[in-house]
Image (cartoon, grey):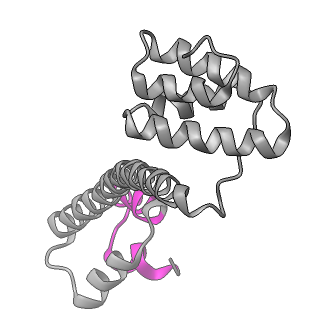
């Protein structure tokens, strides 16, 4: 059936079973490519349906992508399920990739925030060791400092004579 000149017979060869499904579908697509436009669209649709029946839709779609044949299935109800299945598969892959990327970004952000908070706690411990229990307004100001400001404060503690000296400037 694959050797027939009739495209209908070629497509039926898929139902009968192909020895090499990739080569067979490729040969049918080459023949379909040579058809005139209205017949080409119909033959492509029939081939896709037939391939779907034989669980060869993915093979056919892969071969179609490598061939310069256009097929507009957007208005054909027969192929709405193919389009929907592809859309859902793409969404699922996108969600999975997005989750992985989001998790990585979340971990990075968490590490960064953890480092900043760790530096802030060390600075607070150093201040308490050096100057005793910190007044609530100083603890509040310390909590509001940016990462850069906390790091600068950590260095200023070494030379500071008092809390007032450290927190007198507007930070």
53 vs 164: above or below: above
Task: Locate residue 119, reporting x and y percent.
Answer: 29, 57
Camera-side residue of 51 and 101? 51
Task: Locate residue 148, reporting x and y percent.
Answer: 48, 60
Camera-side residue of 10 and 153? 10
Q: Disc count in the image?
A: 0
Q: Is residue 167 magenta?
A: yes
112 vs 169: above or below: above
Residues rendered magenta in the picture: 149-169
161 vs 154: above or below: below
Camera-side residue of 44 and 117? 44
Q: Quadrant of residue 23?
A: top right
Q: Residue at x 22, y 87 (%)?
A: 135
Task: Locate residue 87, reporting x and y percent.
Answer: 49, 56
Q: Main secondary structure of the magenta part?
A: helix
**Residue located farthest toward the bottom when viewing the structure as drawn:** 137
Q: Is residue 30 magenta?
A: no
**Residue 106 visible here:** yes
In the rendered structure, the answer to whether residue 69 lies left or right of residue 160 reads right
Q: Quadrant of residue 2?
A: top right
Q: Residue at x 81, y 25 (%)?
A: 34
Q: Quadrant of residue 139?
A: bottom left
In the rendered structure, the answer to whether residue 97 lies left or right of residue 123 reads right
Q: Residue at x 14, y 78 (%)?
A: 133
């Amino acid at each position: 059936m694959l050797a027939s000149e009739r495209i209908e017979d070629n497509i039926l060869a898929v139902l009968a079973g192909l020895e090499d499904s990739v080569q067979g579908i490729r040969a049918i697509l080459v023949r379909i490519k040579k058809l005139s436009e209205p017949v080409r669209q119909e033959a492509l649709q029939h081939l896709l349906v037939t391939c779907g029946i034989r669980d060869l839709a993915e093979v056919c779609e892969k071969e179609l992508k490598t061939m310069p044949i256009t097929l507009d299935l957007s208005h054909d109800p027969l192929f709405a399920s193919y389009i929907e299945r592809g859309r859902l598969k793409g969404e699922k892959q996108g969600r999975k990739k997005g989750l992985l990327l989001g998790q990585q970004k979340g971990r990075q952000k968490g590490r960064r925030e953890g480092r900043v908070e760790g530096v802030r706690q060390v600075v607070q411990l150093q201040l308490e060791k050096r100057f005793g229990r910190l007044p609530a307004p100083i603890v509040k100001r310390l909590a509001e400092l940016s990462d850069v400001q906390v790091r600068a404060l950590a260095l200023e503690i070494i030379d500071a004579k008092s809390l007032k000296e450290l927190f007198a400037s507007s930070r």
